[in-house]
Structures are given as C-alpha cells and as structure tokens.
C-alpha cells in the first residue's frame, strides 16, 4: 500500500493534540451520506492544534475542508484527496452567557443545542433556527436561517482564523452578509458573540410552532442536506420565489436518478435513498437547473456546499 503522503510530513505528525486518521471513510460525516473517503481525517482537540494544522496545510498548499456539522456539505466524488477537519464539540462547541444579553458560542455547537442553551439563559431570538440541523460555524458561514432571518443578523463579533492560521476578531459591520451568504465563509469561524432578546415564553413558543409548521413537509429523517438551492429572485417581478415551487412546477418532484431522488415532500430537498454517489447527485443538480431555466429563465444557485467536481465551493487552498 502506498504510504499516505500527508503522514510522511513530520511537521504534521508532531502537532500535539491532533488525531490523524489516514484513508478515512467520511461517508457518514455528512447528512447526505454520499460514499466518500478522504486521504486524511484530522481532529484537533484544542485551538492551538487547529492553528498548527492550518499553518502546515497552507505552507504545503494542501487542500483542506473544515467540515462542521456536515449537514449542508455534499461530497461529489468518491475520494477527497486532501484533509477533512472535524472540530469536536468539547473543544469548539461550548456556550457562555455574557453581560448585555450576549451568548458566546463556539463553532462546533449544534444549532439545536444552542437553542436549548439560549432558553435556559433566559433569552430568545433564534427560534427561526428550529429544526435547522448543523453547527454554529457552518450556519454562520452560510448565514443559515428561515424566512427573512439569518444567524448573522445577531452577530456582535466573531473570532475567526484565516487560511494562514492568523486569529482575529471581526466586529459587526466589518463583514458582509445577506440571504444565505456571509463573508465569514472565507475564514474559519471559531466562536461568535450573539446579541439576543429577553425571553418571553409565549412569544418564543409561538415562533417555534410557526417554524415547525412551515417545515413539516421537509424530509429531515432522510439522508439529505437541507435546501439544495437558494430561493431566487424572479427577474420579471423582482420578487423572491420558492426554489422548491419552481422545481415542483418543472415536474421533478419525486424524480429518481439511481439512488438520488427529488423529495416528494419538498422539491428543494434531494434525498439519498441509501446508495447514492456524488456523480449522480451532480447529474441531478444539472438536470434541475436546466429544466427550471428552460421553463422560467431562472438559473437556480446552489445553497449546499459541494466538495469535488466542477461545482466545488468550500475547500480551502
């Protein structure tokens, strides 16, 4: 067997508190679960190990993926010739209540856990994150949200790391964000301060019920990566339109390509029925975009992050 090229590097092997797994099966690390291996899986157990890893990877020009919760990331090929990095919750997923209705939260905390912590801290404001899977870091990188809300709306500041391993604070107003986009995607988010509202139990409960109702048709119990496409703006009217509605009207709800299927419940979800591979997913993406564009003139833009292939969108180089 050919020696792993990354593990031949002593600078990488000598990083303290860094677990390395060569030729790792990373299929189950994403919610879409397309069959994939990675040349190396790296798990840093403190920020110093992460910074050392990032610096070595930058110096060597190694491709590197910060995976986060893996709920909005899809491996489009059966092998990723680079380093996949997981941030363990114990080191990167803690939350602390600060003065001034601020919650300081690590990038590795799951959104569902953050919602519970916020309520226990006597705060609210993030109810739109109800039933949104994934981690805080990934949610900030993509400004995840629902309706007119996104997580970046609540950021007072973020502590980030660059591709070179430099760490600095980004205050509110110093980075751009908009619907399902954030400049924080260009860096590695370590933690963020979120300013929230005082808790009003009845108001918070009503908001949660509203978002649960809106998401009742979404296939969260299946292998999927949430909404695949951003809701586009209709060039004729200037109004936002539902990507799922456009896909449904193109006759694609329930369409199957090998083991990849357009969800029958919500057409903006693509489901892996068990043995789906990345090539089939890319083919389904292209089919949906072509048919919607032919019918409406609208080119759907990806919301999901793609690793590998011509649509690759999230690998640090």
Image (cartoon, rainbow, N blue to C red):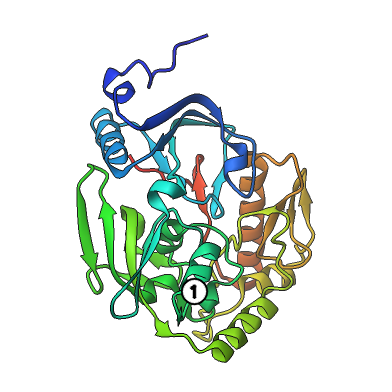
Label 1: how many residues lie within 10 Å, few (<14), some (14-19) or many (20+)?
Answer: few
Say which residue label 1 marks. 120
- Residue 54: x %, y % from top left: 29, 38
| Foreground residue among 297 and 210 | 210
| Foreground residue among 67 and 243 | 67
Residue at image coords 64%, 66%: 292
Q: Quadrant of residue 275?
A: top right
Numbered-mark total? 1
Q: Is residue 292 left or right of residue 182?
A: right
Mark 1 residue element: helix
Residue at image coords 67%, 79%: 214
Q: Is residue 95 left or right of residue 287?
A: left
Question: Vertically, is 48 above or below 178?
Answer: above
Residue at image coords 58%, 79%: 241
- Residue 304: x %, y % from top left: 53, 56
Q: Is residue 217 left or right of residue 155?
A: right
Q: Is residue 134 left or right of residue 265?
A: left
Q: Quadrant of residue 76?
A: top right
Question: Vertically, is 147 above or below 227?
Answer: below
| Foreground residue among 193 and 53 | 193
User: Which quarter of the rendering shows the C terminus?
Assistant: top left
Residue at image coords 65%, 82%: 209
Question: Vertically, is 129 above or below 73?
Answer: below
- Residue 139: x %, y % from top left: 46, 62
| Foreground residue among 243 and 8 | 8
């Amino acid at each position: 067997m050919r020696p792993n090229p990354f593990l031949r590097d002593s600078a990488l092997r000598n990083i303290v508190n860094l677990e390395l797994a060569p030729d790792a099966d990373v299929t189950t690390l994403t919610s879409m679960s397309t069959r994939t291996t990675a040349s190396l899986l790296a798990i840093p157990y403190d920020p110093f190990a992460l910074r050392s890893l990032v610096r070595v990877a930058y110096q060597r020009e190694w491709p590197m993926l910060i995976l986060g919760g893996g709920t909005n990331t899809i491996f489009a090929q059966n092998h990723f010739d680079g380093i996949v990095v997981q941030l363990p919750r114990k080191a990167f997923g803690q939350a602390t209540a600060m003065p001034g209705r601020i919650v300081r939260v690590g990038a590795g905390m799951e959104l569902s856990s953050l919602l519970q912590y916020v309520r226990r801290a006597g705060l609210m404001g993030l109810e739109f994150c109800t039933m949104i899977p994934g981690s805080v870091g990934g949610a900030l990188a993509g400004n995840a949200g629902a309706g007119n809300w996104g997580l970046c709306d609540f950021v007072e500041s973020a502590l980030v790391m660059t591709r070179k391993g430099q760490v600095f604070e980004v205050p509110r107003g110093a980075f751009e964000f908009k619907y399902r986009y954030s400049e924080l995607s260009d860096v590695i988010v370590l933690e963020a301060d979120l300013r929230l509202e005082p808790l009003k139990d009845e108001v918070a409960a009503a908001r949660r019920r509203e978002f649960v109702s809106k998401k009742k048709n979404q296939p969260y119990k299946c292998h999927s990566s949430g909404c695949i496409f951003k809701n586009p703006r209709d060039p004729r009217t200037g109004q936002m339109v539902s990507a799922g509605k456009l896909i449904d009207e193109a006759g694609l709800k329930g369409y199957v390509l090998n083991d990849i299927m357009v969800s029958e419940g919500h057409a903006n979800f693509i489901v892996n029925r068990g043995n789906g591979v990345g090539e089939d997913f890319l083919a389904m993406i292209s089919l949906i975009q072509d048919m919607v564009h032919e019918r409406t003139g609208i080119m759907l833009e990806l919301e999901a992050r793609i690793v590998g292939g011509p649509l690759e969108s999230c690998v640090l180089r």
